[in-house]
Image (cartoon, grey):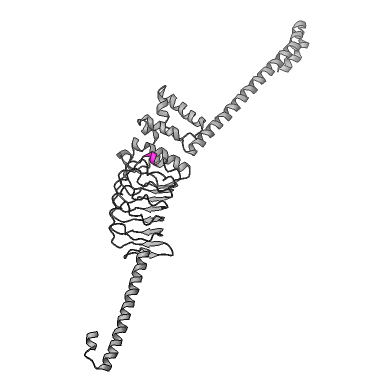
Amino acid sequence: MTAVCQFLKPTVAEQCNELNVLLTLFTGNWLLVLSIVFTVHMAHGCPQKCLCHMASKTADCKNRGFTEIPAHLPPETQILLLQNNRIWRINQNAFTRTPLLKILDLSNNSLSSFAPGALQKLRYLQVLNLTRNLIHYIENKTFSFLPHLKELDLSSNSIVRLPETFGNSTGNITLLSVKHNKLQKMERVLLESLPNLKVVLFKDNPWLCNCNVFGLKLWLESFLYRGGISDGIICATPGIRKGKDLLKVPYELFGACPLTTAHTHLATTHHHSFEHRSSLKHSHHNEHGENSRLSCEPKPKPRPVNLRHAIATVVITGVVCGIVCLMMLAAAVYGCAYAAITAKYHKEHLAPARQHGTPEEKEPFDSSLA
């Protein structure tokens, strides 16, 4: 621009130079403004493809084609939406900059596993959504150090195995969903490690209803008895039980299960009444003899309706027996009274008549007998 002004007339060249100075200042200011905007953007740390809402402390990064957790997220973020991406792994330091996260949605991605300790920085996490991924198994203590976790959704994956524990400090989970997976069994000890569980969803898994799910059946009955909510377990195999509700499979079919299962059951059903357990063991003993105690012990607490029927039967039987006893007692009293009266009558009237032998004295007695 300066070179062009040199070839103009002096008056025009002077104006040209002034314009050049103004243009230079204008361009410099814009560069400064852009630099400030970029600096502010980096300070807040919102990734380029995401939308960060400071008021709701939400980072919306869904449908952006991410293959890993985006960097430079605002440290005050509490809700992170990452659904519908192509994330296939979570690095160990993925959430170092966002320790205040409460809700993490990773649904509909390509996750197959977690790096050890990948989630341990999220001590305030309450909701974790991992639906519609490619997860095949969950390692022991994968969700350790999540003391505030309340909802864990693992549905619509390809999970074939769950661990015996999700990790330390996961006892506050109230909702667990494992529906639409490939589970054939589930360890009872895992469910017992979640004492605050209120809702558990099992449906659409190929459950194998043999001794491996016996403990799960016992736990589920106890869970529902305490007011828990579940969609139930439908057997897929063996063929004779296919399509049946696990809760409706008779306990007699689990008679060959290992004794340790029965001991586990007894340890968790201590709240059942002693009288009811005694009646179950006595009836089973009469059917199978001296060695039936062991096979009887896995018996669960029957449903309340059966218990009411048993109590009603006992009460009715007792009433009937009482009435029969009273009738027999009344008959005995009546017989004794009749015998005493008859004996007294014979003593007072029949003996004098025999002594005198006159027809006139016998006639009242004969009349009275008539």
- Whether 1 is drawn above or below 312: the answer is below
307 relative to 85 in the view: left or right: right
309 relative to 30 in the view: left or right: right
Locate residue 249: give its quadrant.
top left
Q: Is residue 304 visible?
A: yes
Of 126 and 340, nearer the camera is 126
Give the residue at x 51% y 33%. 273
Q: Quadrant of the C terminus?
A: top right
Residue 92 sits inside the magenta stretch? no
Locate residue 34: give its quadrant.
bottom left
Total label count?
0
Image location (x, y in percent) of residue 251: 39, 34
Image location (x, y in percent) of residue 67: 27, 58
Image location (x, y in percent) of residue 365: 74, 14
Q: Quadrant of the N terminus?
A: bottom left
136 relative to 200 in the view: left or right: left
Give the residue at x 33% y 54%. 94
Of 210 and 46, nearer the camera is 46
Q: Is residue 1 visible?
A: no
Tell me where the magenta segment starts and ends, as one range.
186-190
Dominant secondary structure of the residues highlighted in magenta in the image: helix
Of 269 and 249, nearer the camera is 269
Of 330 and 309, nearer the camera is 309
Give the residue at x 30% y 39%. 238
Q: Residue furthest top?
A: 355
Image location (x, y in percent) of residue 218: 41, 37
Residue 187 sits inside the magenta stretch? yes
